[in-house]
Image: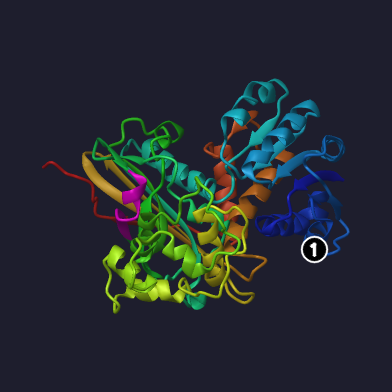
Amino acid sequence: MRTILIIGAGRSASSLIQYLLNKSDVENLHLIIADLSLELAQSKTNNHPNATPIALDISDATQRYSAIQRADIVVSMLPAQLHIEVAKDCIVYKKHLVTASYVNDAMQELDALAKENNLIFMNEIGLDPGIDHMSAMKTINEIIEKGGKMLLFESFCGGLVAPESDTNLWNYKFTWAPRNVVLAGQGGAAKFIQEGTYKYIPYWNLFRRTEFLEVEGYGRFEAYSNRDSLKYLDIYGLKNILTLYRGTIRRVGFSKAWNMFVQLGMTDDSYVMEGSEGMSYRQFVNSFLPYHPTDSVEIKMRLILKIDQDDIMWDKLLELDLFNPNKKVGLKNATPAQILEKILTDSWTLQPKEKDMIVMYHKFGYELNGKKQQIDSKMVCIGEDQTYTAMAKTVGLPVAMATLLILNGKIKTPGVQIPIRKEVYLPILKELEENGIIFKEQSVPYLGYNPE
């Protein structure tokens, strides 16, 4: 038996584990499912004879060494900051490694050692990053191989609620880490290129600068800019491109409403609010409003946000129960962002029978034989339930497929890498199609700036 160690049995590991267990007899696989919670690890194995759940504290070096030594390949589904100790152990014990996380500096520093030991450290092989890389590189390379010159590349992705489960005025529910949603866009200006000019959007303007997108059968969406699109100039080989932009997809109207929280300061994670544990939701809101001897919290809120009582923005705020004097925050030494996350989680948690949805949208503008052309490529994935979500499927399946390709010697290039080479993306995209994750391409009029 060939042993795959999967560290981390959270929600995004569900489809990954199911895929590998379904292949385990034919591929002669045994899975070790390791998690801090043995109960969670056990729940993901479904008592399958080819799976062994174990409790693993990643901070316990002895436990970590023991588990990694038993494996032929290691899959880390841990939070990004925890991969590095696992990666270092994989160097020591000469094991391949697969993660869905961005390559950080610490991981990149292991590149030479990975190559020296002929090890593959595959990263960014989930959804975004992951499927976005592979689907983009496939079409970009096809255009270039025909003799085309890339002029424009825009890429958008969003984790959303499926239409049948869309039951609130925000048209949004949490489908992944709520904290990341609350902190989205912070840490510096969004950077991109538009028609040959570098553009920057500071955080306080980010959610007022959106682009509209149409997806057949699913309606209209909007997208706000991701923090740093410029790094993809090198990653995708697009150094001379005129437009390069990456964004996050939401339903129309979300960004304008979210901007209310940004402008009030409720998404700030840099300081602790005094007395947060005993604070009511209403007191939390009032903390960001000016004092007035007679005006209510509601009136002050509408005045500072410049919204009327019959404005849909006001209805969105009311829906969150923000002004409830009886609901308590219940968090000690909490930041505004942590309190906002708690309030939103009350309203935006997917219920057991509700489904999530992933939408990805690429635009490729190029010149071929003197003619400017454009291809739009769209993918929509709907989750099955709260275990096999669209997020779990689109993150977990590419991780599982890459793991098996490495184990079977189909991916050969060693080193710290992301899935931008044909030996990686061609077989995985093909198999993703067989699993219902399909990009539909169509030729559309080129929409970039044309000086003629």
Point out residue 21 in the picture as x, y percentages from the top left corner. Answer: 78, 57
* Disc 1 residue type (three-letter): Ser
Point out residue 162 in the picture as x, y percentages from the top left corner. Answer: 50, 71
Examine the rendered structure and indicate whether residue 265 appears above or below residue 143.
below
Examine the structure image and report whether residue 206 is included in the region drawn in magenta: yes
- In the displayed orientation, state which residue is furthest to the left: 452
Relative depth, front residue between 221 and 205: 205
Residue positioned 13% across, 41% down in the render = 451
Instruction: Confirm whether residue 436 shows in the render.
Output: no
Point out residue 174 in the picture as x, y percentages from the top left corner. Answer: 54, 64
- The quadrant of the picture occupied by the C terminus is top left
Element under label 1? Answer: helix
Tell me the residue that label 1 is attached to: 43
Examine the rendered structure and indicate whether residue 239 appears above or below residue 348.
above
Relative depth, front residue between 347 and 416: 347
- The quadrant of the picture occupied by the N terminus is top right
Going by the image, does 92 lie left or right of 364?
right
Examine the structure image and report whether residue 256 is included in the region drawn in magenta: no
Going by the image, does 82 lie left or right of 242?
right
Residue positioned 38% across, 64% down in the render = 254
Examine the rendered structure and indicate whether residue 366 appears above or below residue 440.
above
Instruction: Confirm whether residue 170 shows in the render.
Output: yes
Examine the rendered structure and indicate whether residue 174 appears above or below residue 5.
below
Relative depth, front residue between 204 and 156: 204
Going by the image, does 418 lie left or right of 250?
right
Residue positioned 24% across, 50% down in the render = 446
| The quadrant where residue 298 appears | bottom left
Point out residue 329 in the picture as x, y percentages from the top left corner. Answer: 57, 65
Q: Give the residues drawn in magenta, as a range.
A: 202-212
| The quadrant where residue 445 appears | bottom left
Relative depth, front residue between 199 and 92: 199
